[in-house]
Each structure stands twice: as structure tokens, then as C-alpha cells.
Image (spheres, helix red, strand yellow):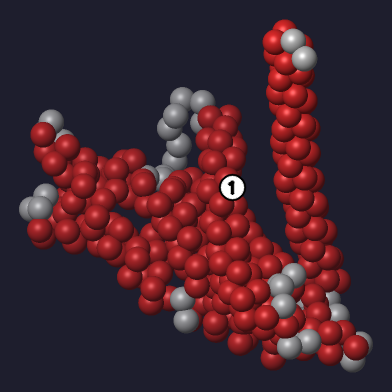
Amino acid sequence: MTPSAETTAEKSSLIAKLYLWLIHSVADIGAVALNWITSVGSVFFFAMQTISWLITRVPKKETLLPNFYQVGVRSLPVVALTGTFIGMVLAVQSYSQFAHIGLQTRLGGVINMSLVTELGPVLAGTMLAGRVGSAMAAELGTMRVTEQIDALASMGANPIQYLVVPRLLACLCLIPALTVVAVFMGVVGGAFYSIFILDIDAFYYWHNSRSVVGLYDLFSGIFKSLFFGIAIAILGCYRGFHCDPGAEGVGRAATAAFVHAFVAIIVLDLFLGILLIGIHKMLWPAGSYIF
């Protein structure tokens, strides 16, 4: 074979390898996209089933109260503690910049606005995704692995109506309340550190806070937390219902429940924030409203 023929053969082989690599890469990307679309569709179908059972039949008090206790009462200390220290951290990190330009009395408005609209709902939702969402996935995943869910279905009870709907109601009702607690404790913690440690005048601190934070801001935070609660409950229960066999599968389900809920919270926060800002501009074009 002549040198020119060998060169042509090498080029042809290289092109063939590149073509095969390109085909496999496109196939892998398509498989990932298909799996992602399938997973989103499965979660959506699971959510629609849960909402349909929620509308048609309200769970009994005996199944609701234990879930309300687990979601609400057991989560109260960690949410309150987190909110308190977040308010203090905001005061510590913001004070030097505001004092540098002589606006330290404006610190209350920045801290409270950040807590009410963003940090309070998001951090409370993140803490509850780790505590509540992972617990739901682990509990339901254990029931799936030990075939308790199958046994429940064989007795004529619908597992979604009996297991998922009470948890969804608990998150829907109590996560907004826990968000209010987190925001309140953050405001108290920020005020305590700013007034008693940083020696900021209390009158101007609260006066500037009131001039910045309004009822619509508080409504925005609570409105976001409603969707955060739905996402935590649906994703946690979904991962538990679709748990892989074995203890390792239960651990992966709990981890996936937290990760997916956290991502959902961040994405929802973005789009809900854009929506609420648009509504605010539509209702109050001048940028002012009644507190």
C-alpha cells in the first residue's frame, strides 16, 4: 500500500470513529433528556392523583393529626433557631457596609425585607425539605421495600389517599405557619443584635423597617411558602413510593427527595418572585402602597 493510500485509510478510520462518537453522544444526551421528561411526567401524574384524592375525600382526623405533629410541632425548634441566627448573621454582615456610608439606621429595613421576602421562606423551606421531605421519603420507602404499601392496596385502601394526602395537607397548612415563625424569629434576632450589640437607635431601626417592609412583602413570602410546601410533600412522597429495593434504595430515595425539593424551591422562588414583582408593579405603578 502506498503512503498516500495509508494516509487516506487513516483519515477514513478517524472520520468513522468521530462519527460513531458523535452518534453515541447524541444517543446519550437523548436518553438523559428522555429519562428527565419521563420523570417529570411521572411526578406530575403522581401530583394530579394526590390532588384528585384531596378534592374528593378529606382524610380522617386520626391520620391527619400525627402528620401535623411531625411536620409542625417537631419542626418548630429548628426553624425558630435557624431564623434567629439568620437575622443575626444578616446584621453582622451588613453593618460594616452601611456604617461606612453612615446609613447604619437603615439596617433594619434591609434585614427585614430580606427575611420577609426571600431568606425566610427559602431557608425555612430548605430546612423543612431536609427534615420533612427526607423523612417522608425514608418512611414511605421503607413501607415500599417491606411491601406494606402493596398490602394496603390489597386490602382495598388507596395508598395515595391514605399515605400521601395527609402529608400534603400537613405541609400545605403548616409550612406557611413555620415560615412566619422563621421570619418573626429572624426579625427578633436581627433587631436584638443591631440594637443591643451594634448600638443602633431602636426608634430609627424600627421606623426604617416599617417604611420599607409592607403587607404585600409579607404576603409574598407566605405565598411562596405554599408552593414550597407542596413541592416538599409531593417530591418526598414520590421518591418514597418509587424507592429502589433494599436499605441502599431507601437512602438514595431520602437523598433524592431533599435534592429535588431544594432545586424545586430555588426554581419556584425565581419564577414566583418574577410573578409577584410583576403583580406589584401592576397594582402599584408608582412603587408605593399602603402598609
Instruction: Check disc 1 and give the amino acid type.
Output: Leu
Residue 233, image x and y in percent?
64, 67
Residue at far top of view: 4
Q: Quadrant of residue 14?
A: top right
Could you tell me if residue 160 is visible in this image? yes
Left or right of 30? Residue 155 is right
Left or right of 180? Residue 88 is left
Q: Residues within 10 Å of mark 1 (few under 14, many from 20)?
A: some
**45 relative to 75, above or below:** above
Left or right of 115? Residue 225 is right
Residue 172, image x and y in percent?
62, 66
Q: Residue at x 83, y 65 (%)?
A: 49
Q: Residue at x 59, y 80 (%)?
A: 68
Q: Which residue is denoted by mark 1 in the rendering? A: 268
Q: If the image is split into quadrants, where does the C terminus sit?
A: top left
**94 relative to 176, above or below:** above
Q: Residue at x 48, y 81 (%)?
A: 73
